[in-house]
Amino acid sequence: MTKKYLLKFGGRALGKPVLADCVLKTKARINILKADAEGNMLVKIPKSSEEKVLRFLRDEGVDVTEQKNVVEYDRERCIDCGLCTSLCPTGAFSLDAESTLVYNEDKCVLCGLCIDACPRRALSKPKF
Ligand code: SF4
Ligand code: SF4
């Protein structure tokens, strides 16, 4: 599966043609999905060239994080009420033996059902 990565161009990565150099060096077909004025860019990197692209970008000072298409969960806000567990169609949320909420983000398909239902606003869509 092709993964998505959030690239943050700041510090020494600013003002340089880092992405162009990366494509030239790695010959990877990087797909830009989104970009904003703050220097953030969401890209898809083909699996076959993922390792060398990530190494190149990090060496050039780009902050790289994998962007998972899953709901964001704020543990600090959560009161373990369990409402999201009854709504989630994939079982991404469950309560453990101590009635503490457990989040398995690998199961989330970002359907959004839990986001509006949470009484504590502990759940949100990815920001980028
Ligand atoms: S609905 Fe919100 S407060 Fe309740 S368990 Fe889920 S995340 Fe926590
Ligand atoms: S967004 Fe949908 S799939 Fe993901 S945790 Fe919430 S209800 Fe489950």
Image (tube, rainbow, N blue to C red):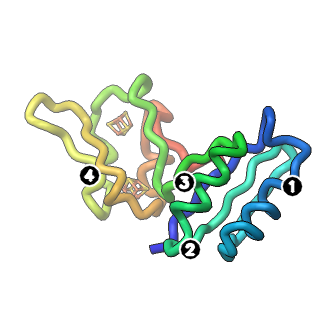
User: Does the beta carbon of the residue at mark 4 sit less than 8 Å from ligand 1?
Assistant: no
Sequence-earlier tag: 1 or 2: 1
Residue furthest right in the image: 15
Q: Quadrant of ligand 1?
A: top left
Secondary structure under the numbered disc 1 in the rendered image: loop
What is the C-alpha distance between the residues marked 1 and 2? 20 Å
> In the rendered image, which residue does mark 1 sit on?
17
Q: Is residue 11 above or below residue 112?
A: above
Secondary structure under the numbered disc 3 in the rendered image: loop
What is the C-alpha distance between the residues marked 4 and 3? 26 Å
Sequence-earlier tag: 4 or 2: 2
Q: Residues within 10 Å of mark 2 (few under 14, many from 20)?
A: some
User: Does the beta carbon of the residue at mark 1 sit less than 8 Å from ligand 2?
Assistant: no
> In the rendered image, which residue does mark 3 sit on?
67
Q: Residues within 10 Å of mark 4 (few under 14, many from 20)?
A: few
> In the rendered image, which residue does mark 4 sit on?
86
Relative to residue 26, is residue 88 drawn left or right? Answer: left
What is the C-alpha distance between the residues marked 4 and 1? 48 Å
What is the C-alpha distance between the residues marked 3 and 1? 23 Å
- In the rendered structure, find residue 46 and report the number of the disc placed on it: 2
What is the C-alpha distance between the residues marked 4 and 2? 36 Å
